[in-house]
Structures are given as structure tokens and as C-alpha cells.
Amino acid sequence: MGKWIKSGSPWIWMTAGSVSLSLIAVLGLLLMIAWRGLVYFWPSPVHQLELEVANGQVETVIGEIYDREQVPLERVLQSGIELKSDEEFVTRYLIKTGNREYVPLDFRWVLEPMIQSDTKPVDVAVFERNKNGNFYGFPVELSFNGQIYTGADIHDQLLLAIDKAADINDEAQELQKVDIGRINYELERLRLDQRKLELNNALTEAAMADLAKRRQQLDDEYQVLEKDLFALRDQAAEDYVVVRDMRGERVTLPMDSVLDVAFPNELGFGGKVAHWMHAIAKFVSDDPREANTEGGVFPAIFGTVFMVLLMAVIVTPFGVIAAVYLHEYAAKNALTKLIRIAVINLAGVPSIVYGVFGLGFFVYMVGGSLDDLFYPEALPNPTFGTPGVIWSALTLAILTLPVVIVSTEEGLSRIPSAVRHGSLALGATKAETLWRIVIPMASPAIMTGLILAVARAAGEVAPLMLVGVVKLASTLPVDGNWPYIHLDRKFMHLGFHIYDVGFQSPNVEAARPLVYATSFLLVSVIVALNLTAIGVRNHLREKFRSLEH
């Protein structure tokens, strides 16, 4: 035994076991997030429950079962609920009933002993709406293209009516966001141009006439587009569907408020898979609705990827230049050692400290100075002197800079000195040797540092809350208005979206599955970014492998 211990084998087994346990824990966590996130989009059956409530009355509840748990009977009785049961524990179900404007809460708990009957009607529909969440009920009448449909005809015509309303809504939304948005942007630019001329004492009669003429042209164009927008909205509101809800009341839903409809109880396995994929596609491509508790997360995906790519473009040259200076040019003295220690220690600084630094230095100092120098006409409203995507990218670039420097230095140290000496002996300068030989050979190490930087930057939220991220961003940092890329704008981030939905949402029960889905999406985005960087690194490694021999 003693000989076996001295051989070092136990340490090898302990190390291998620790690595295996870590990998299993990570994989288990990812699988749990993936399962809880992806199951959110799977169409659940809609139940129609007949409940016995107080005084022997019967109440109908229609909805989806979201969760179930065992509770002690004594605790139920102490809450004032009269229940006849001999069991020590009773099962209770969390039912999503929707119909937010007609019931107090979207979700309600139902005790199993109260259920007299549980059926799954095939004709019950789930309407996804642009406000007030889902609506559950039985379609009884449809008005579509001036005709009234009832009975079995509703099913097919309802899908056509929703497609028509969706097309009109998309056209209206594009008109509002693109065309009318462009006019509003140009009107704001005209206001700033006029203010700039005033500050420069150059607002002449001719300039005022020119501004008034351009403003009048935009106003005329705006009036035309506004009429088109109102016409589209009126056209979308012509059709409607009448639905009988769980109270037995007939509720009219305008088709312009309905985004989608499903009949989950009549779907087979293939239909559920198709519905599941359709729901995932909508989640990834749609804008959020109702304080982020409904709709998709496309602006958050775009903001996360855009900010990380911008950060990568900033941190890579600075990190490589710093590493090259420290390894190739700096003298090996106490000052260099002190700088290296400082760089390594920077990696351990809490990220919120970087956020405070970014807010004070980048936003208030640098951004405020830019506003004073280049955008005085917009003051007191700040342009760059307020949190934005550029300051977020710069803050995260400083946060991840030590990772790139250390990784690049390690890559430079692995290049044999003979390679440098050979290049210099052939007449190349030191700069040429660095640019054509050393840096290309160290590029895989540079990409490794960039991969680590991207992984950390994509998951950081705390500093972004101070320097640019918001709950809802009305516009993306990229659009069709000059200069097309607006680095001063605030943006949405998947990490902050998870925090907001999970901890700031007014409806916690509705938000819980969404948190898992967004978490899985954030992990997927990070994995996709890392795989892209790993692919580039492997390509560079193969390309410059011949230089190593």
C-alpha cells in the first residue's frame, strides 16, 4: 500500500475522479436547464375541471396544469378550507387559467379532493394575444371577410383570419418602425441642426427657410404614412372571434389582438412537435411583450451578441499589444514583474467594480467630454454622456483584458528563440519578425484568450446594469438611419433579461419557465460564440503548424 501511495497513482485517480465529477455536475446542470427550458414550449393539454367549492356549488376551471405538489392536510384545514379527506397529504395542482382581464390571477391552486371531473375537450382553444396573455375558451362564432362562421367551419377559417391579421399587423409594424421611425429621426436631426446653427450664430433667414421647407416635406410625408397606418389598423380590427370562456360568458376577441391559436387537445405527436418548433422559432425571433413576461427575446439576443463582438474587437488588439510589449520589449526588471502581478490581480477584481469605473470614467468623463465637444446642440440631453452599448463593450474589454494578455504571453513564450534568431539572421527587422513570424505562430493562444474573454463577457450582468443595459429597448443599436450603427444607444441583454423576469416580474409563476428558457438560450449563445472562436483557432493552428517545425 505504501509503495502504491508513493508511486503517485492515488493522486492520479483522485484528480481524474474530481474532473469526472465536475464534468458530470456541469452536464447535469446544463441538461436540467435545457429540459426545463425546452419543455416550456411543448403544448400541454388543456383541462376542464369541475370543482366543488363552498356551499356545494360547482365551478368550472379551464387551463393548463403547470405544477403539482403534496401539502399536509392539516395545513390546508388551518387555512380555512373545508376538505373531506382521510389522507395525511393531499395533492394540489397549479393551473394556468389565463383570461387575465376576467379573473384575478393567471394562476390558481386547485386541491385534488375538490375536483369532481377532469376532461380534455378537443374543441377548446388557446389564443395567444398581444396583451393580457393567453385566453382559453371555446370558439363559437367567427367574423371573417364580412361573413359569419359557426360550428366546424370556424376551425379552418380561424387560421386564415389569424394569418390575414398577422400580415396586416406586420405591415403596420414595419410602417411604424421603419418609415415613420425614419421621419421622426430626421425631424430630430433637423431640430439639432437648427440648435447648432443658433449656437454658432449662423441661423440666417435662408437657413431657417431651408429648415422649414425640409420640415414641411417630412410633415407631409408623415401625414400620408399616418393615414396608411390607421387604415391598416382599421382593416385588421374588422374581423373578430367570439369565444365562450370558463365562466360561460361570450367574449369577443378582435383579430388584430390575436397572434396565434392552438387546439392542444386535438394535436397528435407530430402536431405537437411542429407546434413546439414553431413556438421556439417565435421565442427567438419576436420582440418581448408585457414587461418581458410574454413574447420573444430577439432584442436581447441581438444586444448580447452585438456587445460581445464589439468587446472582442476592442480587447484583442489592446491585449495583444500589451502582451507583445511585456514579452518582447520590456526589460526583465522589478517594474515588469510588478506590472504582470497587477495584470493578474486585475482578473480577481469584482465585476461590479468595473461597472462603477465604467460609469465614472467612460460615461461621465469621456462621454460627457464628447458631448461638450461634438454634440453641444443636444445638451442638456446627453448623447454619449449616458450609458450605452459602446461603454458596456469598453467596460467588459477592460474586465477581460488580463485574460487576453496572460494567454497571449503564454503563447509567445512557447515560440522557440531559434525562430526569432533565424528570422533576424536572414535580414528581417524585429518588427517584421514579430508581424510575420511570431504573432501568426501565437495566434492560436490569442484565440484561446479571446474564447475565455467571450465566455466571461457574455455572462456578466452586474457591470452592464450601470453602463448600458436596460429592461426594454425600443430600438436596436443597428437600424436603417444614418450612421446605421448607433453606439450611444442602450441595449437589452439575455443575462439581465433573466434577472428581470425572474426577480422583477409581477407574475412569478408565469416567469419561472421563461427564466429556464432564456437561461438555456444564453448558454447556447455562449457555446455558439465559443465554437466559432475554437473553429478559427483550429484553422490558425493548422495553418501555422509548419512554422513550428
Image (cartoon, helix red, strand yellow):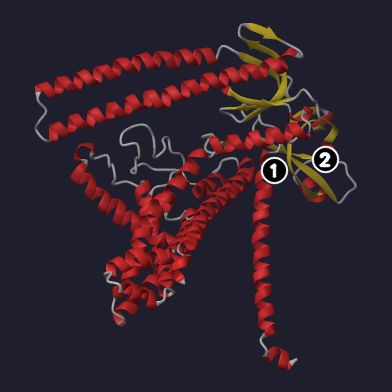
Residue at image location 64% in from the left, 61% down from the top: 26
* Rendered location of residue 221, percent (x, y): 32, 16
* Rendered location of residue 116, percent (x, y): 86, 32
Outermost residue toward the bottom?
2
Q: Is mark 2 on a helix, strand or loop?
A: helix
Mark before the other along the chain sequence, 2 or 1:
1
Callout count: 2
Of the residues tagged 2 and 1, which is closer to the observer?
Answer: 1
Q: Nearer the viewer, residue 178 or 82?
A: 178
* Rendered location of residue 525, percent (x, y): 54, 49
The amino acid type found where label 2 is placed reads: Glu
The amino acid type found where label 1 is placed reads: Val
Compute the Cα span from label 2 to label 1: 24 Å
Report if residue 256 is visible in the image. no
* Rendered location of residue 408, percent (x, y): 41, 67
Residue matched to label 1: 39
Residue matched to label 2: 112
